[in-house]
Image: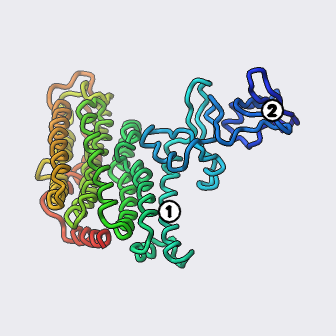
Amino acid sequence: MVGGKPVSCGLRPSGECVGPFDVELGPTWHSTLCDEAAGYCVAPEAHCADGWCHIPPRSYLSGYGSDRFEGSALDAAISVVQRGFYVQETEFTRGDFVALMGYEPQATSACGSDCPVTGVTLFEAVAVANTMSTVLVYAAAAHAQGGVFTGAMSWASITAIAHQLDPAIVRIGFIFVMVGYGTKAGLAPMHMWLPDAHSQAPTPVSALLSGVLIKCAIFGIIRFHIIARAACGPEFSGELLMVFGLVSVVVATPFILAQHDLKRLLGYHSVEHIGIVALGLGFGGRLGTYGALLHVITHGVTKALVFLGAGDVIARYRNRDMRAIRGYLGVAPVAATLLLFGTLSLAGLPPFSIFMSELLVVQAGIGAGHLVAVGVFLVMLLIIFAGIIHHVGEMVFGVAGPEVSRERERVTPLVGMVLLAAVMLALGLTIPAPLNQLLEQAVEVILG
């Protein structure tokens, strides 16, 4: 029944099946493949039987990006790494997706029979990876207890029996964690969305996105890291975090050097710094874990300051291309000074806060014997330092053109920037006792 008209299937000379489908199409595919006025749908690679166009269960609708996928759920998640924004089609069917996720997969637009089309967006693939990681850990916990038990979905309950969990299941679950939550955090090579999101979002949103939101994904990784440490030992999850962290720093470096868009530059800096957090967790020990948690705070404060400064730059110059931005210090001296301080902190220069957390991470790596990783990390930091100082130095100094707004600096934004700069400097000189106690307690929880 299509458009209220009973129809029967038939085959065109080209081999396309014309008629109703044996599966229910979502609204996007219905509008793509069905002609409501004529009362039929056209399905390639289907056969006609019993009045229906039967779609092969292990194929996809060529050229229409179908609702079917080739491979497995694991392929769908891992393909995020390979393809970035979209997952290749796999045997993981639309029905499987709906059963797992509770909603229809979002379809992509048709692009012709010769164009490879994909059926799952980044959001959906990440949702699958995150859900699978939770399901696997829950299944391991239920298996260890001989079935569903009280508090089976409680982190405290699972952590208490983590040493009894099947290490193989937990390892697979943690791989899903690194793909799913790692994408949300912006770890390379699943980071492609992050610079785009930074560059398109309003400046206050970019500050929250970089300073707060991506750290929530790190919090999710840490919670699974605690379970994986107890079930598999510290080596597996620690080495995985170290690899992803180091790759993130290395991948971000050339993009930071070559970038001309101011907000995209800061986006790639987020990839670098989230990699530093992962490195600290991967190096492990009290020092590495403490340094990683401290870096979450110091980077959040610093990046918020820099984004607010960048927002003022873009508003005055009406341009995000750093090659067109000169003489900011002469246009807005207070904001330019604060932006320069924030940039020096991002580059890891003392006495600012990020220097302290990065120093702790480096010390942890040396103490754990990861000398090669530490060496690569330090080389990348040196290159990034040179790159960001070059970019921001050219923006701050020089002579601004006549088209630049020389409106008087507003007090309210400057108050927020000054407060952030004060916190940034204070954390570089000393760590307040309450914050130190809080971080120590968090380290105890993570390391058990």
The residue pinned by badge 1 equals 136
Percent across and percent down for residue 169 are 46, 63
Near-viewer residue (342 or 220)? 220
Residue 301 in view in this figure: no
Indicate the quadrant where residue 320 lies: top left
Q: Residue 55 at what x, y percent from top left?
A: 72, 38
Query: Which residue does the image show at 83% across and 32% down from the upper left?
Result: 9
Provide residue 446's location: percent of width, then percent of height.
31, 68
State the residue at coordinates (53%, 38%). 88
* Mark 2 surroundings: few (<14), some (14-19) or many (≥20) residues within 10 A: many
Determine whether, in the image, residue 93 is placed left or right of residue 152: right
The vertical placement of 18 against 340, above or below, is: above
Q: Residue at x 32, y 36 (%)?
A: 264
Numbered disc 1: secondary structure? helix
What x and y, as percent, mark residue 176?
45, 54
Q: Residue at x 61, y 34 (%)?
A: 65
What's under tag 2, amino acid-wise? Gly
The first of marks 1 and 2 along the sequence is: 2
Examine the image and state in which quarter residue 369 appears.
Answer: bottom left
The three-letter code of the residue at mark 1 reads Leu
Dot label at residue 19: 2
Q: Quadrant of the N terminus?
A: top right
Q: Is residue 186 visible?
A: yes
Q: Residues within 10 Å of mark 1 (few under 14, many from 20)?
A: some
Q: CA distance from mark 1 to mark 2?
A: 41 Å
Q: Residue furthest right?
A: 6
Image check: 214 left or right of 273? right
